[in-house]
Amino acid sequence: MLSSPALSIFVTLEGIEGTGKSTQATRLAKRLRAEGYDCLLTREPGGTAIGREIRQVILSPKNHRMCAETELGLYFSDRAQHLREVVWPALEARRIVVSDRFTDSTLAYQGHGRGLPLRLVRSLDRIMTGEFRPTVTLLLDLTVQEGLLRARRRNRESAAHGREGRFEEEELAFHQRVRKGYAQLAKKDPDRYVTVSATGTIKEVTEALWLALKRTGKLPRAK
Ligand code: TMP
């Protein structure tokens, strides 16, 4: 296990469905590169070849009978592989890693959303990741109603997203618990978390994320 060296930082983007996280992760990575940083953009689940297979199993609407414990195990299996194959080597190479989701997603979705005991999530976290934490977590916040409206619109327009709709099919109350869970996690860890509103235009939100990241003072000098 590794703790992020000073010259490389691990930035994660979190949020409920429809906050535009993936678009923003891509744009933030682009911005970092434009500012002279060597940045690696990755995601969970699915940041490795094994992870992409795991992603299909977890998100396929066909697998609606999957129990919460199986889901939990699969997310951590994806993460264990992702850390060892992608994230840790990139941090060792002094790159900035931007990941679209990480362990906070599991705490929010499987813990707060599904109602699995948080101590169970934390024990797996200890075993699979050594409680590895991002340097900065940018939480994109939006109401559940607006988020689901955007996510469902996107799924209708994109065949790939349509095949991954298991979570969007969950009831409103599930997503409300996830959003509340994120708010609690952010409150408990104010040194790592920055909450950014996802209500603006794509460009405005990218700018807000970039400024928030700069203001943390954790960004090293560009090469
Ligand atoms: P994505 O659509 O942001 O790529 O994420 C896929 C889905 O997986 C999304 O609905 C959130 C969910 N998820 C969890 O429930 N737990 C996790 O640990 C992760 C990483 C994602």
Image: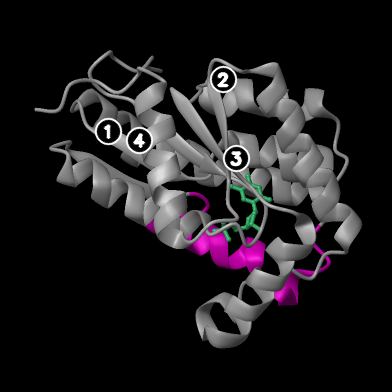
In primary-sequence order, the first of circles 1 and 4 is 4
Give the class, few, some or many, for how many residues have Cα within 10 Å of label 4's Cα (few <14, many ≥20).
many
Q: Residue at x 62, y 72 (%)?
A: 164
Q: Position of residue 140 (x, y in %)?
A: 58, 45
CA gap, disc 4 and disc 2: 14 Å
- Which quadrant holds the C terminus? top left
Left-right relation of 211 to 155: left
CA gap, disc 3 and disc 2: 12 Å
Badge 2 amino acid: Glu
Q: Nearer the viewer, residue 16 or 97?
A: 16
Indicate the secondary structure of the residue bearing disc 3.
helix
Q: Which mark is residue 87?
A: 4
In primary-sequence order, the first of circles 1 and 2 is 1
> Which residue carries the number 1 mark?
96
In primary-sequence order, the first of circles 4 and 2 is 4
Residue 165 in sight in this render:
no
Indicate the secondary structure of the residue bearing disc 1.
strand
> Which residue carries the number 3 mark?
76
**Foreground tag (1 vs 4):** 1
Q: Can you say whether 192 is above or below 157 in the image?
A: above
Give the class, few, some or many, for how many residues have Cα within 10 Å of label 1's Cα (few <14, many ≥20).
many
Give the class, few, some or many, for how many residues have Cα within 10 Å of label 2's Cα (few <14, many ≥20).
some
Badge 4 amino acid: Val
Badge 3 amino acid: Phe
CA gap, disc 1 and disc 2: 19 Å
Please state the extent of the stretch shown in magenta in the rendering: 44-66
Q: Can you say whether 24 is above or below 184 in the image?
A: below
- Which quadrant holds the N terminus? top left
Mark 1 and mark 4 in contact? Answer it, CB < 8 Å: no
